[in-house]
């Protein structure tokens, strides 16, 4: 049963503002009308009288839907309000804002990655084209050589995450692909993870390469169970490393903050 949102200090349900109500009505009409990205929204649909609000509230409703990526306004000849589509990158950035002031933990992220990434790998086995494999190999090329600087090593660590995002973009299940891309994006942007990725660890590049080359071979051969097993192993090892590094950094931080003990005389 859906829980009703309540105002602070009271038990009355929180009422939607008129612009929000109008935006919801217009959104439902677009969906029920079967409009697709690029289709023009009929002018009468956005008429304030049709939406049952004032002109000001109607304008606010359009701004809400435009901010959400549902519509886009064009001026000049042939202009009007058109149905738009949200890019997955923009949606991910918006969702990430939920965690700006309270990041999920590394364990939270890997609890999901350990389940979904192996299924992603299995789902694309035997389904990818040569162009798909070329895109995956291109990310590997970015970190197959020894890094010459710490910054280059960091970029290589980011390229390893890009490999997983490239794989996820090719999932036939768009929901599965989106969630996997989102998990990789969180790891890329979380402060604790950035600090871990910037730490020089030469053997990690070889480990990552080994997993991903084996994974590509299994996927290309259509061996779904093998691809699932390789990816699961990869996720378990990656989680173990990330948690160990996070713990080391936490202990080091506590030691640095501890007050110096007085010397005996």
Image (tube, grey):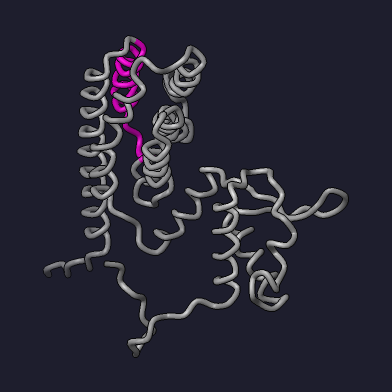
Nearer-the-camera pick, 168 or 110: 168
Residue 234 in the image: above or below residue 41: above
Task: Identify the residue shown where x is 41% and y is 32%.
Answer: 168
Q: Residue furthest top?
A: 221
Q: Which residues are magenta?
A: 197-220
Q: How many marks?
A: 0
In the visual, does 228 lie left or right of 185? left
Q: Residue furthest left?
A: 264
State which quadrant residue 50 falls in.
bottom right
x, y percent for residue 52:
64, 75
* Residue 157 appears in the picture as rendered: no
Q: Is residue 101 magenta?
A: no
Residue 106 in the image: above or below residue 169: below
Nearer-the-camera pick, 233 or 219: 219
Task: Identify the residue shown where x is 31% and y is 32%.
Answer: 201
Q: Residue furthest bottom?
A: 9
x, y percent for residue 129:
47, 14
Magenta span main SS: helix
* Quadrant of the rendering where the N terminus is positioned: bottom left
Task: Identify the residue shown where x is 28% and y is 30%.
Answer: 119
In the visual, does 140 lie left or right of 39? left
Task: Identify the residue shown where x is 41% and y is 29%.
Answer: 172
x, y percent for residue 112:
27, 43
State which quadrant residue 158 falls in.
top left
Q: Is residue 209 magenta?
A: yes
* Quadrant of the rendering where the C terminus is positioned: bottom left
x, y percent for residue 106:
27, 48
Residue 60 in the image: above or below residue 33: below
Residue 129 in the image: above or below residue 30: above
Nearer-the-camera pick, 30 or 224: 30
* Residue 72 appears in the picture as rendered: yes
């Amino acid at each position: 049963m859906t829980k009703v949102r309540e105002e602070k200090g009271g038990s009355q349900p929180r009422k939607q503002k008129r612009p929000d109500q109008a935006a919801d009505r217009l959104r439902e009409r677009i969906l029920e009308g079967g409009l697709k990205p690029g289709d023009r929204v009929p002018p009468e649909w956005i008429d304030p009288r049709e939406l049952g609000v004032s002109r000001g509230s109607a304008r606010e409703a359009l701004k809400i839907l435009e901010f959400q990526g549902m519509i886009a306004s064009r001026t000049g000849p042939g202009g009007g309000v058109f149905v738009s589509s949200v890019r997955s990158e923009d949606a991910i950035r918006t969702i990430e804002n939920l965690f700006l002031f309270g990041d999920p933990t590394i364990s939270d992220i890997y609890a999901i990655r350990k389940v979904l990434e192996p299924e992603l790998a299995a789902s694309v086995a035997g389904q990818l084209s040569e162009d798909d494999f070329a895109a995956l190999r291109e990310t590997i090329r970015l970190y197959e050589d020894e890094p010459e600087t710490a910054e280059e090593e960091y970029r290589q660590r980011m390229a390893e995450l890009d490999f997983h995002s490239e794989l996820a973009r090719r999932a036939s299940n768009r929901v599965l692909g989106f969630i996997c891309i989102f998990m990789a994006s969180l790891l890329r942007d979380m402060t604790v993870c950035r600090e871990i990725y910037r730490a020089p660890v030469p053997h990690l590049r070889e480990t990552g390469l080994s997993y991903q080359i084996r994974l590509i071979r299994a996927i290309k051969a259509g061996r779904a169970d093998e691809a699932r097993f390789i990816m699961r192993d990869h996720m378990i090892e990656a989680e173990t490393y990330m948690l160990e590094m996070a713990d080391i950094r936490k202990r080091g931080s506590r030691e640095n903050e501890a007050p110096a003990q007085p010397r005996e005389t």
